[in-house]
Image: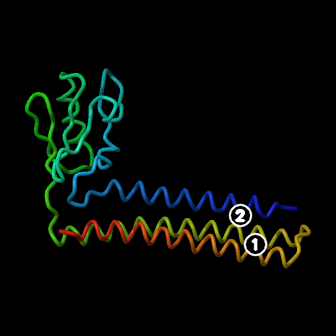
Amino acid sequence: MIDVKETLNGAEERMEMAAMFLDESLNRIRAGRANVAILDGVRVNSYGTKVPLNQVANVSVPDPRTIAIRPWDKKAIRDIEKAIMDSDVGITPENNGEIIRLGIPQPTEERRKELVKQCNKICEKAKVEVRNVRSEIKDKLKKAIKDGLSEDNEKDAELDLQKIHDKYIKKLDDLLAAKTKEIMTV
């Protein structure tokens, strides 16, 4: 017989992972404001190995439209610039020999709408994952009736599962709404 509490906790944990995935994915989308999270995927070739940018340089946001990257080793400037150019960041770096600056351009109205569509697609993936978890756990609960779980317990567990599902769908919608507002704000 299955442990209903443990099963629901496992489902909630997986739904939380979907929310975390969405949050991280939305942070990587640049919305006209400087955000160091857009550089999370950048890997720099340092002494023969690819390492995250934040392990070879100090990354900061001096003003809302600029990201400053100060390499710890001045010789790494070329490698950092190359890594940024090769990544999907889409911004050309400028350097003065000591600091690399990324100027974040103001997106056009059309570009903002594209970014919102991109966010919606990512959010829908996360929602599908939450729904899949709910469906999977529902099936487990239905099978558990055959193994001796009472129908009342199964119905209660299903209601609890639905509440957890609704909570995470609302959380995903809230994350999306916040990002959409950030993107559409001029």
Task: Residue 58: give x, y in percent of width and height.
Answer: 27, 33
Left/right placement of residue 113 relative to residue 66 reads: right
Q: Are marks 1 and 2 in contact (CB under 8 Å)?
A: yes
Amino acid under disc 2: Leu
For the C terminus, the quadrant is bottom left
Query: Which residue in the protein does label 2 denote?
Result: 8
Label 1, on which residue?
A: 157
Judging depth in this view, the residue of 37 and 42 nearest the camera is 37
Q: Is residue 23 left or right of residue 74?
A: right
Q: CA distance from mark 1 to mark 2?
A: 8 Å
Residue at 62% x, 70% y: name it.
164
Q: Is 82 positioned to the left or the right of 174 in the image? A: left
The colour style of the image is rainbow
- Image mark for residue 60: none
Q: What's the residue at 26%, 69% (across, down)?
A: 114
- Find residue 75 and report its horizontal and vertical position in percent: 19, 22
Left or right of residue 53, residue 112 in this image: left
Question: Who's the residue at 20% across and 59% down the image?
Answer: 32
Vertical comparison of 154 with 57: above or below: below
Provide the secondary structure element on which disc 1 rests.
helix
Q: Amino acid at mark 1?
A: Ala
Say few, some or many: other residues with alpha carbon within 10 Å of mark 2 (under 14 / 14 to 19 / 20 or more): some
Toward which corner of the image does residue 96 lie, by quadrant?
Answer: top left
- Dot 2: element: helix
Task: Residue at 41%, 54% (x, y): give it.
Answer: 24
**Number of numbered callouts drawn:** 2
Picture coordinates of residue 23, whole percent (x, y): 43, 58
